[in-house]
Protein backbone atom coordinates (compact mmCIF):
# COMPACT_ATOMS: atom_id res chain seq x y z
CA UNK A 1 0.00 0.00 0.00
CA UNK A 2 1.41 3.36 -1.03
CA UNK A 3 0.74 6.60 0.74
CA UNK A 4 -0.08 9.61 -1.37
CA UNK A 5 -0.70 12.51 1.04
CA UNK A 6 0.95 15.06 -1.25
CA UNK A 7 -1.13 13.95 -4.24
CA UNK A 8 -4.23 14.13 -2.09
CA UNK A 9 -3.44 17.74 -1.13
CA UNK A 10 -2.51 18.63 -4.71
CA UNK A 11 -5.81 17.25 -5.99
CA UNK A 12 -7.80 19.25 -3.44
CA UNK A 13 -5.93 22.40 -4.45
CA UNK A 14 -6.38 21.70 -8.18
CA UNK A 15 -10.12 21.16 -7.80
CA UNK A 16 -10.50 24.73 -6.55
CA UNK A 17 -9.28 26.25 -9.81
CA UNK A 18 -9.59 23.53 -12.47
CA UNK A 19 -12.96 21.84 -13.13
CA UNK A 20 -12.69 18.40 -11.52
CA UNK A 21 -9.03 19.16 -10.82
CA UNK A 22 -7.87 17.93 -14.24
CA UNK A 23 -7.44 19.16 -17.80
CA UNK A 24 -8.83 15.96 -19.35
CA UNK A 25 -11.53 13.94 -17.60
CA UNK A 26 -10.07 10.40 -17.52
CA UNK A 27 -7.21 11.63 -15.35
CA UNK A 28 -9.56 12.24 -12.42
CA UNK A 29 -10.08 8.49 -11.76
CA UNK A 30 -13.86 8.92 -12.08
CA UNK A 31 -14.31 5.34 -13.28
CA UNK A 32 -12.25 3.73 -10.51
CA UNK A 33 -12.58 6.18 -7.62
CA UNK A 34 -9.80 7.51 -5.39
CA UNK A 35 -7.18 10.19 -5.83
CA UNK A 36 -4.92 10.24 -8.90
CA UNK A 37 -1.19 10.40 -8.19
CA UNK A 38 0.21 13.76 -9.26
CA UNK A 39 3.25 13.12 -11.41
CA UNK A 40 6.61 14.70 -10.69
CA UNK A 41 8.62 13.13 -13.50
CA UNK A 42 8.98 10.25 -15.93
CA UNK A 43 11.99 8.34 -17.16
CA UNK A 44 11.95 5.37 -19.51
CA UNK A 45 9.17 3.00 -18.41
CA UNK A 46 8.66 4.68 -15.02
CA UNK A 47 6.76 7.54 -13.46
CA UNK A 48 7.37 9.08 -10.04
CA UNK A 49 4.61 10.86 -8.17
CA UNK A 50 5.08 13.88 -5.91
CA UNK A 51 5.10 11.57 -2.87
CA UNK A 52 8.16 9.79 -4.30
CA UNK A 53 6.37 6.57 -5.31
CA UNK A 54 7.61 4.87 -8.46
CA UNK A 55 5.24 3.24 -10.95
CA UNK A 56 5.76 1.05 -14.01
CA UNK A 57 3.82 3.12 -16.54
CA UNK A 58 1.47 1.42 -19.02
CA UNK A 59 -0.44 4.60 -19.85
CA UNK A 60 2.39 6.32 -21.71
CA UNK A 61 0.47 9.60 -21.73
CA UNK A 62 -2.43 7.61 -23.29
CA UNK A 63 -0.37 6.54 -26.29
CA UNK A 64 2.36 8.93 -27.39
CA UNK A 65 5.28 7.62 -25.30
CA UNK A 66 6.15 4.55 -27.37
CA UNK A 67 9.86 5.25 -26.76
CA UNK A 68 9.34 5.73 -23.02
CA UNK A 69 9.71 8.99 -21.11
CA UNK A 70 12.59 11.33 -21.82
CA UNK A 71 14.21 9.40 -24.67
CA UNK A 72 17.64 11.10 -24.96
CA UNK A 73 17.41 11.64 -28.72
CA UNK A 74 13.93 13.13 -28.55
CA UNK A 75 14.92 15.38 -25.65
CA UNK A 76 18.01 16.56 -27.55
CA UNK A 77 15.93 17.31 -30.65
CA UNK A 78 13.49 19.41 -28.61
CA UNK A 79 16.36 21.23 -26.89
CA UNK A 80 18.02 22.07 -30.22
CA UNK A 81 14.75 23.34 -31.67
CA UNK A 82 14.07 25.36 -28.52
CA UNK A 83 17.29 27.27 -28.94
CA UNK A 84 16.33 28.31 -32.48
CA UNK A 85 12.94 29.74 -31.46
CA UNK A 86 9.61 28.32 -30.34
CA UNK A 87 7.19 29.54 -33.01
CA UNK A 88 7.37 31.53 -36.23
CA UNK A 89 4.02 31.20 -37.98
CA UNK A 90 5.98 30.79 -41.20
CA UNK A 91 6.99 27.69 -43.17
CA UNK A 92 9.92 25.62 -41.89
CA UNK A 93 11.80 22.71 -43.46
CA UNK A 94 11.08 20.58 -40.40
CA UNK A 95 7.37 20.53 -41.28
CA UNK A 96 8.17 19.13 -44.72
CA UNK A 97 10.51 16.59 -43.14
CA UNK A 98 7.77 15.35 -40.77
CA UNK A 99 5.28 15.24 -43.66
CA UNK A 100 7.80 13.24 -45.72
CA UNK A 101 8.37 10.79 -42.87
CA UNK A 102 4.62 10.27 -42.44
CA UNK A 103 4.04 9.83 -46.18
CA UNK A 104 6.95 7.40 -46.43
CA UNK A 105 5.51 5.28 -43.63
CA UNK A 106 1.70 5.38 -43.68
CA UNK A 107 0.49 3.60 -46.85
CA UNK A 108 -2.51 5.86 -47.62
CA UNK A 109 -0.79 9.21 -47.11
CA UNK A 110 0.40 11.19 -50.12
CA UNK A 111 -0.08 14.63 -48.58
CA UNK A 112 -0.53 15.60 -44.95
CA UNK A 113 -1.53 18.67 -42.93
CA UNK A 114 -0.20 19.14 -39.39
CA UNK A 115 -2.50 20.36 -36.60
CA UNK A 116 -2.24 20.42 -32.80
CA UNK A 117 -4.29 17.49 -31.51
CA UNK A 118 -6.07 14.34 -32.57
CA UNK A 119 -9.41 16.08 -32.09
CA UNK A 120 -8.40 18.84 -34.47
CA UNK A 121 -7.19 16.28 -37.01
CA UNK A 122 -10.52 14.45 -36.95
CA UNK A 123 -12.57 17.65 -37.07
CA UNK A 124 -10.58 18.87 -40.07
CA UNK A 125 -10.70 15.51 -41.89
CA UNK A 126 -14.49 15.43 -41.53
CA UNK A 127 -14.83 18.94 -42.96
CA UNK A 128 -12.56 17.97 -45.82
CA UNK A 129 -14.56 14.80 -46.52
CA UNK A 130 -17.77 16.83 -46.54
CA UNK A 131 -16.28 19.53 -48.73
CA UNK A 132 -14.89 16.95 -51.13
CA UNK A 133 -18.07 14.87 -51.44
CA UNK A 134 -20.54 17.77 -51.03
CA UNK A 135 -22.50 15.53 -48.66
CA UNK A 136 -23.28 15.99 -44.94
CA UNK A 137 -23.87 12.64 -43.29
CA UNK A 138 -21.21 10.75 -41.35
CA UNK A 139 -21.07 7.14 -40.23
CA UNK A 140 -19.30 6.27 -36.98
CA UNK A 141 -19.27 3.16 -34.79
CA UNK A 142 -20.44 2.78 -31.21
CA UNK A 143 -17.48 2.55 -28.83
CA UNK A 144 -15.04 4.34 -31.14
CA UNK A 145 -13.73 7.67 -29.85
CA UNK A 146 -12.48 10.33 -32.21
CA UNK A 147 -11.78 13.25 -29.89
CA UNK A 148 -14.31 15.73 -28.59
CA UNK A 149 -15.68 16.75 -32.01
CA UNK A 150 -19.40 17.75 -31.81
CA UNK A 151 -20.38 15.51 -34.72
CA UNK A 152 -18.92 12.45 -33.05
CA UNK A 153 -20.07 12.86 -29.44
CA UNK A 154 -23.10 11.00 -30.55
CA UNK A 155 -24.79 7.70 -29.71
CA UNK A 156 -27.23 5.65 -31.73
CA UNK A 157 -30.76 7.00 -31.41
CA UNK A 158 -33.76 4.79 -30.73
CA UNK A 159 -34.95 4.76 -34.33
CA UNK A 160 -32.83 1.82 -35.51
CA UNK A 161 -29.50 3.56 -36.05
CA UNK A 162 -30.80 6.43 -38.14
CA UNK A 163 -30.55 9.72 -36.26
CA UNK A 164 -27.74 10.09 -33.74
CA UNK A 165 -28.35 11.68 -30.34
CA UNK A 166 -25.80 13.82 -28.45
CA UNK A 167 -23.84 12.16 -25.64
CA UNK A 168 -22.85 15.50 -24.12
CA UNK A 169 -24.83 18.58 -23.19
CA UNK A 170 -23.80 21.32 -25.58
CA UNK A 171 -23.79 19.15 -28.69
CA UNK A 172 -26.72 20.39 -30.79
CA UNK A 173 -29.30 17.90 -31.99
CA UNK A 174 -29.00 19.59 -35.37
CA UNK A 175 -25.35 18.46 -35.55
CA UNK A 176 -25.90 15.01 -34.09
CA UNK A 177 -28.66 14.19 -36.55
CA UNK A 178 -26.17 13.98 -39.41
CA UNK A 179 -24.23 11.25 -37.64
CA UNK A 180 -25.26 7.64 -38.07
CA UNK A 181 -23.98 5.34 -35.35
CA UNK A 182 -23.51 1.70 -36.29
CA UNK A 183 -22.24 -1.40 -34.53
CA UNK A 184 -18.48 -2.10 -34.68
CA UNK A 185 -17.47 -5.30 -36.46
CA UNK A 186 -20.87 -5.57 -38.15
CA UNK A 187 -20.39 -5.48 -41.95
CA UNK A 188 -24.09 -5.98 -42.68
CA UNK A 189 -25.04 -2.86 -40.69
CA UNK A 190 -22.79 -0.81 -42.95
CA UNK A 191 -24.22 -2.30 -46.15
CA UNK A 192 -27.74 -1.59 -44.86
CA UNK A 193 -26.91 2.04 -44.02
CA UNK A 194 -25.55 2.70 -47.51
CA UNK A 195 -28.52 0.94 -49.09
CA UNK A 196 -30.84 3.20 -47.08
CA UNK A 197 -28.95 6.44 -47.80
CA UNK A 198 -27.23 6.10 -51.19
CA UNK A 199 -25.17 9.11 -52.24
CA UNK A 200 -25.75 10.91 -48.93
CA UNK A 201 -22.94 9.72 -46.65
CA UNK A 202 -19.79 11.85 -46.88
CA UNK A 203 -17.53 9.72 -44.72
CA UNK A 204 -17.18 6.59 -42.66
CA UNK A 205 -14.80 7.10 -39.76
CA UNK A 206 -13.45 4.15 -37.81
CA UNK A 207 -10.70 3.18 -35.39
CA UNK A 208 -9.29 0.25 -37.41
CA UNK A 209 -8.09 -1.17 -34.11
CA UNK A 210 -10.44 0.27 -31.51
CA UNK A 211 -8.65 1.48 -28.41
CA UNK A 212 -11.27 3.61 -26.75
CA UNK A 213 -13.64 0.84 -25.65
CA UNK A 214 -10.58 -1.07 -24.51
CA UNK A 215 -8.57 -2.70 -27.27
CA UNK A 216 -11.02 -4.32 -29.71
CA UNK A 217 -9.51 -5.38 -33.04
CA UNK A 218 -11.62 -4.99 -36.15
CA UNK A 219 -12.19 -8.10 -38.21
CA UNK A 220 -10.59 -7.93 -41.64
CA UNK A 221 -13.97 -8.61 -43.22
CA UNK A 222 -15.44 -5.56 -41.44
CA UNK A 223 -12.69 -3.21 -42.66
CA UNK A 224 -12.79 -4.66 -46.17
CA UNK A 225 -16.55 -4.08 -46.27
CA UNK A 226 -16.00 -0.45 -45.26
CA UNK A 227 -13.49 -0.09 -48.08
CA UNK A 228 -15.73 -1.72 -50.69
CA UNK A 229 -18.96 0.02 -49.73
CA UNK A 230 -17.45 3.53 -49.50
CA UNK A 231 -15.66 3.09 -52.83
CA UNK A 232 -18.86 1.99 -54.54
CA UNK A 233 -20.83 4.90 -53.09
CA UNK A 234 -18.22 7.63 -53.50
CA UNK A 235 -17.92 8.22 -49.74
CA UNK A 236 -14.59 8.90 -48.03
CA UNK A 237 -13.16 6.19 -45.76
CA UNK A 238 -11.32 7.71 -42.81
CA UNK A 239 -9.11 5.54 -40.61
CA UNK A 240 -8.68 7.27 -37.28
CA UNK A 241 -5.18 6.07 -36.42
CA UNK A 242 -4.50 8.69 -33.75
CA UNK A 243 -3.87 5.79 -31.39
CA UNK A 244 -3.02 2.85 -33.67
CA UNK A 245 -0.72 4.83 -35.99
CA UNK A 246 2.96 3.95 -35.51
CA UNK A 247 1.85 1.65 -32.66
CA UNK A 248 0.27 -1.56 -33.95
CA UNK A 249 2.78 -1.46 -36.82
CA UNK A 250 5.10 1.18 -38.24
CA UNK A 251 2.53 2.00 -40.93
CA UNK A 252 -0.39 1.62 -38.51
CA UNK A 253 -3.43 -0.65 -38.77
CA UNK A 254 -3.68 0.02 -42.51
CA UNK A 255 -0.32 -1.66 -43.02
CA UNK A 256 -1.31 -4.58 -40.81
CA UNK A 257 -4.69 -5.18 -42.48
CA UNK A 258 -3.47 -4.11 -45.94
CA UNK A 259 -6.48 -1.88 -46.45
CA UNK A 260 -5.89 1.63 -47.75
CA UNK A 261 -8.30 4.32 -46.52
CA UNK A 262 -8.83 7.63 -48.34
CA UNK A 263 -7.90 9.76 -45.33
CA UNK A 264 -6.02 8.98 -42.13
CA UNK A 265 -5.96 10.94 -38.90
CA UNK A 266 -2.87 10.78 -36.72
CA UNK A 267 -1.72 12.20 -33.40
CA UNK A 268 -0.17 10.89 -30.17
CA UNK A 269 3.06 9.15 -31.31
CA UNK A 270 3.73 11.56 -34.19
CA UNK A 271 4.23 14.34 -31.62
CA UNK A 272 6.68 12.38 -29.49
CA UNK A 273 4.94 13.68 -26.34
CA UNK A 274 4.27 17.20 -27.59
CA UNK A 275 0.89 18.39 -28.90
CA UNK A 276 0.52 17.34 -32.56
CA UNK A 277 -2.14 15.92 -34.81
CA UNK A 278 -2.20 15.34 -38.54
CA UNK A 279 -4.56 14.33 -41.28
CA UNK A 280 -3.46 13.02 -44.62
CA UNK A 281 -4.39 10.90 -47.57
CA UNK A 282 -4.82 10.92 -51.31
CA UNK A 283 -3.42 14.10 -52.87
CA UNK A 284 -6.58 14.45 -54.95
CA UNK A 285 -8.60 14.88 -51.73
CA UNK A 286 -5.99 16.74 -49.66
CA UNK A 287 -5.61 19.39 -52.37
CA UNK A 288 -9.14 20.56 -51.54
CA UNK A 289 -7.72 22.19 -48.38
CA UNK A 290 -7.05 25.94 -48.42
CA UNK A 291 -4.89 27.41 -49.93
CA UNK A 292 -4.58 24.61 -52.52
CA UNK A 293 -8.37 24.29 -52.50
CA UNK A 294 -11.35 25.87 -50.77
CA UNK A 295 -11.98 23.87 -47.56
CA UNK A 296 -10.95 26.15 -44.71
CA UNK A 297 -8.56 24.95 -42.01
CA UNK A 298 -5.81 26.90 -40.23
CA UNK A 299 -3.75 27.02 -37.03
CA UNK A 300 -1.49 29.62 -35.37
CA UNK A 301 0.76 26.96 -33.82
CA UNK A 302 0.31 24.22 -36.46
CA UNK A 303 3.65 22.71 -37.41
CA UNK A 304 5.16 24.14 -34.23
CA UNK A 305 8.97 23.78 -34.22
CA UNK A 306 9.23 21.99 -30.83
CA UNK A 307 6.42 19.56 -31.58
CA UNK A 308 7.74 18.94 -35.07
CA UNK A 309 11.27 18.26 -33.75
CA UNK A 310 9.94 15.74 -31.20
CA UNK A 311 7.83 14.06 -33.88
CA UNK A 312 10.67 13.80 -36.39
CA UNK A 313 13.04 12.33 -33.81
CA UNK A 314 10.43 9.81 -32.69
CA UNK A 315 9.50 8.65 -36.19
CA UNK A 316 13.17 8.45 -37.24
CA UNK A 317 13.99 6.25 -34.26
CA UNK A 318 11.00 4.00 -34.99
CA UNK A 319 12.00 3.69 -38.65
CA UNK A 320 15.67 3.03 -37.87
CA UNK A 321 15.25 0.59 -35.01
CA UNK A 322 12.02 -1.27 -35.96
CA UNK A 323 11.02 -2.05 -32.37
CA UNK A 324 7.76 -3.70 -33.43
CA UNK A 325 8.83 -7.35 -33.11
CA UNK A 326 10.15 -6.59 -29.62
CA UNK A 327 6.97 -4.69 -28.68
CA UNK A 328 4.86 -7.58 -29.96
CA UNK A 329 6.82 -10.04 -27.83
CA UNK A 330 6.70 -7.93 -24.64
CA UNK A 331 3.05 -7.08 -25.09
CA UNK A 332 2.07 -10.72 -25.66
CA UNK A 333 4.11 -11.83 -22.66
CA UNK A 334 2.46 -9.19 -20.48
CA UNK A 335 -1.13 -9.82 -21.47
CA UNK A 336 -0.75 -13.61 -21.52
CA UNK A 337 0.74 -13.40 -18.02
CA UNK A 338 -2.14 -11.25 -16.78
CA UNK A 339 -4.69 -13.57 -18.36
CA UNK A 340 -3.06 -16.64 -16.82
CA UNK A 341 -2.94 -14.94 -13.42
CA UNK A 342 -6.66 -14.13 -13.58
CA UNK A 343 -7.45 -17.62 -14.78
CA UNK A 344 -5.49 -19.21 -11.91
CA UNK A 345 -7.42 -17.03 -9.44
CA UNK A 346 -10.73 -18.07 -11.01
CA UNK A 347 -11.51 -14.61 -12.38
CA UNK A 348 -13.13 -14.61 -15.82
CA UNK A 349 -11.28 -12.38 -18.30
CA UNK A 350 -10.87 -11.93 -22.04
CA UNK A 351 -8.03 -10.25 -23.83
CA UNK A 352 -8.07 -7.79 -26.73
CA UNK A 353 -4.64 -7.13 -28.18
CA UNK A 354 -2.92 -5.97 -31.35
CA UNK A 355 0.80 -5.44 -30.94
CA UNK A 356 1.61 -3.02 -28.13
CA UNK A 357 -2.03 -2.12 -27.54
CA UNK A 358 -3.96 -4.38 -25.18
CA UNK A 359 -6.82 -4.65 -22.70
CA UNK A 360 -7.68 -7.22 -20.07
CA UNK A 361 -11.47 -7.31 -20.05
CA UNK A 362 -13.22 -8.51 -16.90
CA UNK A 363 -15.73 -10.38 -18.99
CA UNK A 364 -17.06 -13.90 -19.38
CA UNK A 365 -17.51 -13.34 -23.12
CA UNK A 366 -15.14 -12.20 -25.87
CA UNK A 367 -15.36 -8.44 -26.45
CA UNK A 368 -16.03 -7.54 -30.10
CA UNK A 369 -18.08 -4.33 -29.97
CA UNK A 370 -19.42 -1.71 -27.56
CA UNK A 371 -22.26 -3.91 -26.33
CA UNK A 372 -19.91 -6.67 -25.21
CA UNK A 373 -17.39 -4.15 -23.83
CA UNK A 374 -20.05 -2.33 -21.82
CA UNK A 375 -21.09 -5.63 -20.23
CA UNK A 376 -17.69 -5.98 -18.48
CA UNK A 377 -17.46 -6.11 -14.69
CA UNK A 378 -16.18 -2.57 -14.11
CA UNK A 379 -16.28 -3.04 -10.34
CA UNK A 380 -13.79 -5.90 -10.58
CA UNK A 381 -11.71 -3.76 -12.93
CA UNK A 382 -11.65 -0.89 -10.44
CA UNK A 383 -10.52 -3.23 -7.64
CA UNK A 384 -7.80 -4.67 -9.85
CA UNK A 385 -6.72 -1.21 -10.92
CA UNK A 386 -6.23 -0.04 -7.33
CA UNK A 387 -4.53 -3.28 -6.33
CA UNK A 388 -2.01 -2.64 -9.14
CA UNK A 389 -1.56 1.04 -8.34
CA UNK A 390 -0.81 0.14 -4.72
CA UNK A 391 1.84 -2.26 -6.01
CA UNK A 392 3.52 0.34 -8.22
CA UNK A 393 1.87 -0.44 -11.56
CA UNK A 394 0.18 2.45 -13.34
CA UNK A 395 -2.58 1.10 -15.62
CA UNK A 396 -5.16 3.15 -17.52
CA UNK A 397 -7.86 4.07 -14.97
CA UNK A 398 -10.77 2.67 -16.98
CA UNK A 399 -11.83 -0.72 -18.32
CA UNK A 400 -12.43 1.03 -21.64
CA UNK A 401 -8.85 2.09 -22.33
CA UNK A 402 -5.91 0.20 -23.78
CA UNK A 403 -2.60 -0.26 -21.99
CA UNK A 404 0.62 0.45 -23.85
CA UNK A 405 3.98 -1.23 -23.32
CA UNK A 406 6.85 0.90 -24.63
CA UNK A 407 10.31 0.27 -26.00
CA UNK A 408 11.64 1.16 -22.54
CA UNK A 409 9.85 -1.72 -20.77
CA UNK A 410 12.12 -4.65 -19.96
CA UNK A 411 11.34 -8.30 -19.35
CA UNK A 412 11.93 -7.60 -15.65
CA UNK A 413 9.24 -4.87 -15.73
CA UNK A 414 6.82 -7.30 -17.35
CA UNK A 415 7.61 -10.02 -14.80
CA UNK A 416 7.20 -7.56 -11.91
CA UNK A 417 3.84 -6.51 -13.37
CA UNK A 418 2.59 -10.08 -13.71
CA UNK A 419 3.72 -10.87 -10.19
CA UNK A 420 1.90 -7.79 -8.83
CA UNK A 421 -1.18 -8.86 -10.79
CA UNK A 422 -1.12 -12.34 -9.27
CA UNK A 423 -1.24 -10.76 -5.80
CA UNK A 424 -3.96 -8.39 -7.00
CA UNK A 425 -6.09 -11.20 -8.43
CA UNK A 426 -5.70 -13.19 -5.19
CA UNK A 427 -6.94 -10.15 -3.26
CA UNK A 428 -9.88 -9.83 -5.64
CA UNK A 429 -11.00 -13.43 -5.45
CA UNK A 430 -10.61 -13.40 -1.64
CA UNK A 431 -12.81 -10.29 -1.51
CA UNK A 432 -15.43 -12.00 -3.69
CA UNK A 433 -15.39 -15.13 -1.54
CA UNK A 434 -15.42 -13.14 1.71
C1 LIG B 1 -6.76 10.18 -28.52
C2 LIG B 1 -7.61 9.99 -29.69
C3 LIG B 1 -8.19 11.07 -30.37
C4 LIG B 1 -8.13 12.48 -29.86
O1 LIG B 1 -6.83 12.98 -29.81
P1 LIG B 1 -6.53 14.23 -28.84
O2 LIG B 1 -5.10 14.56 -29.13
O3 LIG B 1 -6.77 13.74 -27.45
O4 LIG B 1 -7.47 15.31 -29.21
C5 LIG B 1 -8.88 10.82 -31.55
N1 LIG B 1 -9.00 9.57 -32.03
C6 LIG B 1 -8.47 8.51 -31.40
C7 LIG B 1 -8.62 7.16 -32.00
C8 LIG B 1 -7.77 8.68 -30.21
O5 LIG B 1 -7.28 7.60 -29.58
Image: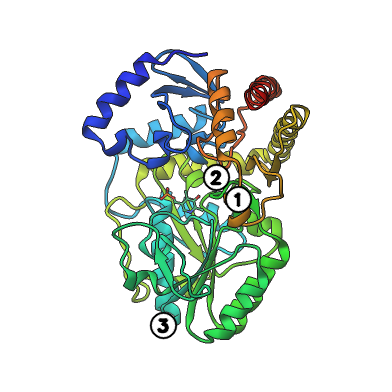
Q: Are the residues flagged by discs 1 and 2 in contact, CB closer than 8 Å? A: yes
User: Mark 2 highlights which residue?
Assistant: 400
**Quick check: 369 left or right of 342?**
left
Looking at the image, is mark 3 or mark 1 nearer the viewer? 1
Residue at image coords 48%, 27%: 70
For numbered disc 2, what is the local secondary structure? loop
User: Mark 1 highlights which residue?
Assistant: 373
Q: Residues within 10 Å of mark 1 (few under 14, many from 20)?
A: many
Residue at image coords 43%, 62%: 152
Q: Residue furthest front?
A: 434
- Tell me the CA gap for discs 2 and 3: 35 Å
Note whether residue 121 is visible: yes
Which label's residue is closer to the chain start, 2 or 3?
3
**As drawn, 164 above or below 52:** below
- Tell me the CA gap for discs 3 and 1: 35 Å
Residue at image coords 47%, 15%: 53
Of 88 and 124, which appears nearest the observer?
124
Note whether residue 290 is visible: no
- Tell me the CA gap for discs 1 and 2: 7 Å
Of 151 and 339, which appears nearest the observer?
339
Q: Quadrant of residue 39?
A: top left
User: Mark 3 highlights which residue?
Assistant: 134
For numbered disc 1, what is the local secondary structure? helix
Q: Are the residues flagged by discs 2 and 3 in contact, CB closer than 8 Å? A: no
Amino acid sequence: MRDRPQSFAAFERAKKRIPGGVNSPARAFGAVGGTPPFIARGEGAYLWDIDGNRYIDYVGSWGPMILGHGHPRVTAAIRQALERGTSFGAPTEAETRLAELIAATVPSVEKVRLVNSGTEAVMSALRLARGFTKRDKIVKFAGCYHGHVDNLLVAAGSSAATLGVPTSPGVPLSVAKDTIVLRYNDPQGVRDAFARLPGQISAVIVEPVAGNMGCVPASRDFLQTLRDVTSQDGAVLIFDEVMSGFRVALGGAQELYRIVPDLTTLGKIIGGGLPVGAYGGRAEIMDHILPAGKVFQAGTLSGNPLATAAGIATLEILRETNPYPQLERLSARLIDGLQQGACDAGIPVHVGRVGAMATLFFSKKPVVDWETAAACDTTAFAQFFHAMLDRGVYLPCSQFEALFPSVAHTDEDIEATISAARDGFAELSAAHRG
